[in-house]
Image (cartoon, rainbow, N blue to C red):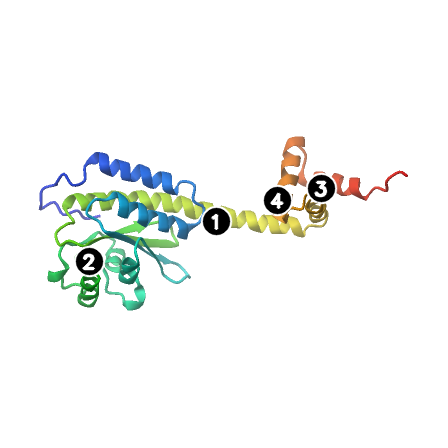
Amino acid sequence: MNLDTRLPMTDDLGVLETAALLRELTAGLIGVAEFDEALDRLVRIARDAVPGVDCCGFTALRAGEPAGVAASDPRCAELDDLRHGPDTPALTAIRRREMIIAGGLAEESRWPTWSIRARALGVHGVISAPVDVDEQVIGAINLYASTPGALTPSHQLTAMLLAEHAGLLLAAVRDRERAAARADQLDGALLAEGVIGQAVGVIMTQRGCPAAEALGVLRSAASSLDIPLREVAERLVLTVSRPRDN
């Protein structure tokens, strides 16, 4: 990823501030199980933690799905909306696989239509850094400033580190999302299986709980007894089906 080293680094963003941002980002995303929620948290954390950045957006391209946008503020959503066309800093960063910097949009000629719209929304500087998530998802994180010249080489370094770290965290979220989907499929198959489905129905009736919770109870019993899930289900169904002695 390119980094403009022609200007001296400023003290706007020190090592400690950047480290604090990455720690906060890790804490905010480490337990998230849904990708869209992770993107929402990412852009809010970046906006609040990076001095000089007034709003933050994320443009996500997913294989076989519509492009997605997350924004810390409504004007970011407007700037990242791909319905306005492909000539944007975010798509340029994704297409070229390198960081894109525009410190003063009044002099910018790469995206004339987009720049006019950005200035009308009070945005005068942007850094877009590509984010590699996995084989199915790529994107760009976009840092916007309201003041011309507010985005310095230090912001470029922060954007580069932020993009790298966000890619790793978002990939983990995607893994958790896929694991949850596989678990749901497995649960559906188990519930459709005769004796396990019957046992789950018994527990639902006894406890007044939903199917997922009942299946969890059955799994806990199988783990505690160290016997297969099917055997626990068979024992439960057999127990409740026995005629009671008068």
Which numbered disc flags the more N-terminal residue, 1 or 4? 1
Mark 1 against mark 2, which lies toward the viewer? 2
Tell me the element at label 4: helix
Whole-number angstrom distance, CA of label 1 to CA of label 3? 27 Å
Which numbered disc flags the more N-terminal residue, 1 or 2? 2
Q: Amino acid at mark 3?
A: Ala
Closer to us: 90 or 242: 242
Tell me the element at label 2: loop
Whole-number angstrom distance, CA of label 4 to CA of label 2? 49 Å
Give x and y (percent) for residue 202. Answer: 72, 45
Which residue position is annotated with label 3? Answer: 233
Mark carried by residue 242: none
Whole-number angstrom distance, CA of label 2 to CA of label 3? 61 Å
**Residue at 15 percent of width and 53 percent of height:** 147
Give x and y (percent) for residue 131. Answer: 30, 50
Mark carried by residue 213: 4
**Residue at 71 percent of width and 39 percent of height:** 231
Closer to us: 235 or 200: 200
Which numbered disc flags the more N-terminal residue, 4 or 3? 4
Which numbered disc flags the more N-terminal residue, 1 or 3? 1
Mark carried by residue 178: 1
Q: Amino acid at mark 4?
A: Glu
Whole-number angstrom distance, CA of label 1 to CA of label 4? 20 Å
Q: Describe residue 154's horizontal placement relative to residue 141 as left or right.
A: left
Q: Describe residue 115's horizontal placement relative to residue 207 as left or right.
A: left
